[in-house]
């Protein structure tokens, strides 16, 4: 059903929880393959990707070129871009499957993309503080840490991860626009970078 694409660079600590969250999707035949687009990591990123059965594409090319190469290698028509450390919450498989099935029924020009909503913090923030954080995130728009589910035809129509920018992932989200980008009910947690 979909190809998950994870861009990495020295991401071993954040990659493992992301790949672990995708295992149930593979077991449910939602995730067809996982491609790790690596920027020549010097840590154990490659070992983790290999042990998980991922396809590993290694290059010193800029991020946008590595992501485009991964899309060309993808076998599925749906693409799920996840940064290492982005962990979809339980329930994501059904939500993503529903979105894909509903979107497949639309005319090609009406198709949309989707992102996960910001997940609840692993901490113990009060519900009101958590609600305010979600409202702020919704107002500010979707960011790359929330992942991106997109049909490869729409990806191509929008120019994919185009010419180098300061943040090629955010630039693609901006080109999709708020009208075409659905925020799923299921959230995605973000594992913080190691300090």
Image: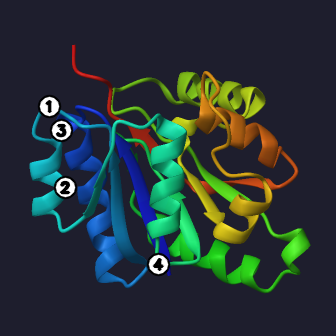
- Quadrant of residue 154 within the rendered picture: bottom right
User: Which residue is label 2 attached to?
Assistant: 49
Q: How many marks?
A: 4
* Camera sees residue 195: yes
- Please state the horizontal and vertical placement of residue 193, each as a whole percent of the image: 30, 23
User: Which residue is label 4 attached to?
Assistant: 75
* Side of 158 relative to 45 (left or right): right
16 or 171, which lies in front?
171
Label annotation for residue 60: none
- What is the spatial separation of the Cα atoms under label 4 and label 1, in whole angstroms? 28 Å
137, above or below 181, in the image: above
Residue under the image location 44 percent in, 68 percent down: 73
The kind of secondary structure element at disc 1 is loop
Instruction: Please report whichever mark, 2 or 4, sits nearer to the chain's N-terminal start.
Output: 2
- What is the spatial separation of the Cα atoms under label 1 and label 3, in whole angstroms? 10 Å
- What is the spatial separation of the Cα atoms under label 3 and label 2, in whole angstroms? 9 Å
Instruction: Please report whichever mark, 3 or 2, sits nearer to the chain's N-terminal start.
Output: 3
- What is the spatial separation of the Cα atoms under label 4 and label 3, in whole angstroms? 25 Å
Residue under the image location 51 percent in, 44 percent down: 65
167 or 100, which lies in front?
167
184 or 127, which lies in front?
184
Label annotation for residue 12: 3
Of tags 2 and 1, which is closer to the observer?
Answer: 1
- Please state the horizontal and vertical placement of residue 104, each as a whole percent of the image: 73, 83
User: Which residue is label 1 attached to?
Assistant: 42
96, above or below 179, in the image: below
Instruction: Please report whichever mark, 4 or 1, sits nearer to the chain's N-terminal start.
Output: 1
């Amino acid at each position: 059903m979909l190809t998950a694409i994870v861009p990495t660079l020295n991401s071993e600590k954040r990659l493992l929880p992301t790949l672990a969250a995708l295992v149930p999707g593979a077991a449910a035949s939602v995730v067809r393959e996982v491609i790790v687009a690596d920027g020549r990591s010097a840590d154990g990123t490659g070992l983790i990707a290999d042990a998980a059965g991922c396809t590993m594409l290694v290059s010193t090319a800029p991020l946008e070129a590595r992501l485009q190469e991964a899309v060309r290698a993808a076998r599925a028509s749906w693409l799920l871009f996840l940064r290492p450390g982005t962990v979809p919450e339980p329930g994501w498989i059904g939500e993503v499957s529903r979105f894909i099935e509903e979107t497949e029924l639309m005319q090609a020009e009406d198709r949309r993309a989707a992102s996960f909503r910001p997940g609840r913090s692993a901490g113990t923030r009060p519900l009101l503080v958590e609600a305010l954080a979600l409202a702020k995130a919704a107002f500010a728009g979707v960011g790359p840490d929330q992942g991106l589910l997109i049909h490869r035809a729409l990806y191509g129509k929008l120019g994919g991860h185009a010419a180098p920018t300061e943040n090629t992932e955010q630039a693609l989200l901006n080109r999709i626009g708020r009208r075409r980008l659905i925020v799923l009910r299921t959230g995605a947690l973000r594992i913080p970078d190691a300090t």
